Amino acid sequence: MTTLAHDVFEVEQVKPLIGAAITSNKETLLSGKYAKDIRAMLEDRGVIVFKKVDFTDEEQVAFTKTLGNFVQEMTGDTFKISMDKAINPVAEYTKGAFYWHIDGTMDRVPLFASMLSARRLAPVGGNTAFCNTYAAWDALPDEEKAQIENLRVVHSLVAAQLFVEPEPTSAQFEGWNSLGTNEIPLVWTHMSGHKSLVLGSTAEYIVGMNPIESRRLLIKLREWCTQDQFSLSHAWTIGDAVIWNNTGTMHRAEAYPLDCDRLMVRTKLAGEEAFA
Ligand code: OGA
Ligand code: MN
């Protein structure tokens, strides 16, 4: 006798301005029945936690595909986030994830969303934190909005990697710098008309501003966005999957021991609009 899947789909808000937590099961999620609701929730809540859904790699790929245009990682359908070089040969770059960032600030069209699932946990630390950059923009005083609305920011991998390796060799520097720079707006006016702040560790400087003023403003805005009311820190349970709207949030991995075997599996959805 086959057991029919029960349709389970319960949604709770995690915090008033960010996060939804969904209790469901694989069958319901993989059916695509709630794909539209989940897309709408990504816009609205920024981050969605699927509690203990226990996806295999194949199921995570299939579920991600129900939500938009699936994109391959460099390593195939999935990318394994680990500090073990035998599992993740680019572990050195992955350390950049310990600082607030948006995935793909070096691209014209950044990723729409990324999904992580927890396969092995860090013994301490290793939460993933998110902040809502739409809500952070919305809450800025009008006067500050007017002052920063038209600023442009140069992003680079150099800026991000200097957090990880503050005294690089020239060869390391040239490796990072070979990716060049990307000048994009500080305030992104999305096709919906809604605005969000575009910051993160790749933000090198604000165009036309002296270096100290520029650094001061970037720090101040990062501090603003990552305030408690706009952010959440997800403490993982094995089998949780989390998807975030990469165009309206920043995220980072919270510190964990570099020699532990924390393993997260990532899948991605292609961007649908350019920074503007
Ligand atoms: C990422 C990322 C954070 C984490 O996969 O893009 O930033 O907690 N991961 O591993
Ligand atoms: Mn990331």
Image: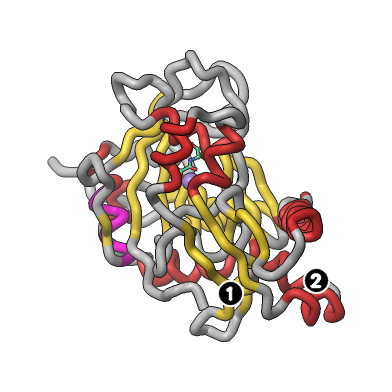
Judged left or right of residue 115, residue 246 is right
User: What is the residue that sits farthest to the top in this orientation?
Assistant: 259
The three-letter code of the residue at mark 2 reads Leu
For this rendering, which residue is in front, 249 or 234?
Answer: 249
Residue shown at 28%/50% (left/top)? 27
Residue shown at 65%/63% (left/top)? 133
Residue 177 part of the magenta-drawn span: no
- In the picture shown, does residue 143 fall above or below 91? below
Residue 103 is at least partly visible in this image: yes
Prevailing SS of the magenta stretch = helix
Which label number is shown at residue 188? Answer: 1
Which label number is shown at residue 101? Answer: none
Q: CA distance from mark 1 to mark 2?
A: 14 Å
Q: Which stretch is magenta? A: 61-68
Q: Quadrant of residue 7?
A: bottom left
Q: Which residue is mark 2?
A: 140
* Residue 263 percent across, percent down from the top left: 40, 27
